[in-house]
Image: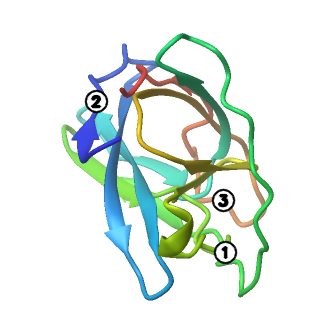
Amino acid sequence: MKQSASAWSEPAGALSGRVSIEPETVAAGVRYAVYLELRNHATHAIALTNQPQIEAELRDAAGKPVATTDFPISGPVPNPQWAVIPGEACLGFRIDRQTVGIPPQTQGMVLLAVGNQSWGLGAGKYLLTLEATFTAEAHAPPHPWLGKLALPPLA
């Protein structure tokens, strides 16, 4: 995978979304930073959490599911925050799991960790499909946006 973005999803209520991804080099190796971009089609503001539940599926060029890889996890898990998207505006935030250990560059893998899954990817073509579900949480602002967005696949 290289830096790219999917098409926008069909609106669910007044909200549509897409996924963008870009490689990020850190001290240990390389991981993919995954962003959820949301577009508010309404004229009024929409509030939602920056930590939706993410269901992820990764397939190879032949359309077969890619096996997940267990990497160590460490570090603090950030607290959810509420975001407000003004009317007719867009907002993006990271949804990859940044607490997953990155494979050393010597292993020739790039980390992709999103939802409750992680993969060590070698060279090749992949198709990433995500669903983001926004649920009611404690301390929610009045009238938060709740629902599920099926995001277009990202190759």
Q: Position of residue 88 (x, y in %)?
A: 19, 37
Q: Is residue 154 left or right of residue 96?
A: left
- Residue 140: which numbered mark, if any? 3
Q: Nearer the viewer, mark 3 or mark 1?
A: 1
Mark 3 and mark 2 lie on one chain; the one further toward the N terminus is 2
Nearest the eye: 90 or 145? 90
Q: Is residue 111 left or right of residue 87?
A: right
- Residue 42: which numbered mark, if any? 2
Residue at 67% in and 22% down: 65
Q: Position of residue 18 (x, y in %)?
A: 35, 33
How many C-alpha atoms fall within 10 Å of the one at disc 3: few (<14), some, or many (≥20)? Answer: some
From what the image shows, is residue 72 above or below residue 36? below
Write down the quadrant of residue 102 in the picture.
bottom right
Mark 1 — residue? 101
How many C-alpha atoms fall within 10 Å of the one at disc 1: few (<14), some, or many (≥20)? Answer: some
Question: What is the three-letter code of the residue carrying label 1?
Answer: Gly
Residue 86 makes an appearance in the image: no
Q: CA distance from mark 3 to mark 2?
A: 20 Å
Could you say whether the residue bearing mark 1 is in a helix, strand or loop?
A: loop
Residue 51 makes an appearance in the image: yes
Screen quadrant of the N terminus: top left
Q: CA distance from mark 1 to mark 2?
A: 39 Å
Q: Position of residue 71 (x, y in %)?
A: 76, 65
Q: Is residue 78 left or right of residue 9?
A: right
Residue at 53% in and 23% down: 60
Mark 1 and mark 2 lie on one chain; the one further toward the N terminus is 2
Q: Is residue 72 left or right of residue 131?
A: right
How many C-alpha atoms fall within 10 Å of the one at disc 2: few (<14), some, or many (≥20)? Answer: some
Nearest the eye: 28 or 79? 28
Residue at 49% in and 46% down: 122
